[in-house]
Amino acid sequence: MAQNYSKKSASKRQEKQPKSAFPVFMSGFILGIVACQVLPFLLKESAQSGVSGDQIIDIKTPVVPDFQFPNLLKGIEESDAIYLIQVSSFKNAADAESLKVKLMLLNFEVFTEVYEKSTDDIWHRVVVGPFANKRESSQARRKLTDNNYDSLLLKIDKT
């Protein structure tokens, strides 16, 4: 059962070929070009008709921002105060001296201070410092925290 496909298949191929999309593409392309040429003129006219002469703003002049935050921070560092860091306080002077030596090994300027309460209790404070500003004291407190020492910031006015 041999069949001759040559004549039938050639006619079927010609019938099933899709129609070209070129005319649709060209009409869309031309319509897009016309819209790009006409649309700016229409938008310009509608923008000018909605705004009166008093309301026109010159957009070409740039607005310069006014940054006040850096100026607010100037002068905050107080020169009439001393900052100290109290690391601990002990009733026993030997314990205070022991901690003082440990902190001196960490390169801190350390001194002990005797504090007498109103109930006749005597305490020995271990104090690091003095520091001229908060920045220096915060760096020292960070170093103390890194070495597992709690601290308390003390501000003493010079005047």
Image: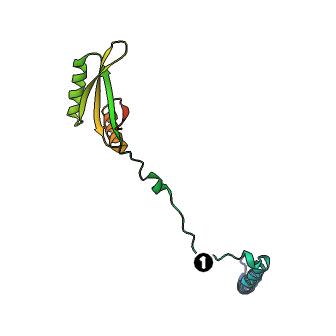
Q: Is residue 86 visible?
A: yes
Q: Is residue 21 visible?
A: no
Image height of 88 relative to 33, above or below: above
Decide which of 9, 159 is in the foreground and name it. 159
Q: Based on the displayed image, in which of its 4 quarters is residue 12 positioned? A: bottom right
Image height of 33 relative to 110, above or below: below
Q: Is residue 49 left or right of residue 84?
A: right
Q: Based on the displayed image, in which of its 4 quarters is residue 35 positioned? A: bottom right
* Residue designated by label 1: 60
Q: Secondary structure at mark 1?
A: loop
Judge the density around disc 1: few (<14), some (14-19), many (≥20) Cα neighbours within 10 Å. few
Decide which of 121, 150 is in the foreground and name it. 121
Image height of 49 relative to 134, above or below: below
Give the residue displayed 21% in from the left and 32% down from the top: 104
Q: Is residue 11 left or right of residue 149?
A: right
Give the residue displayed 78% in from the left and 79% down from the top: 46
Residue 77 image point, x, y percent: 39, 47
- Figure quadrant of the C terminus: top left
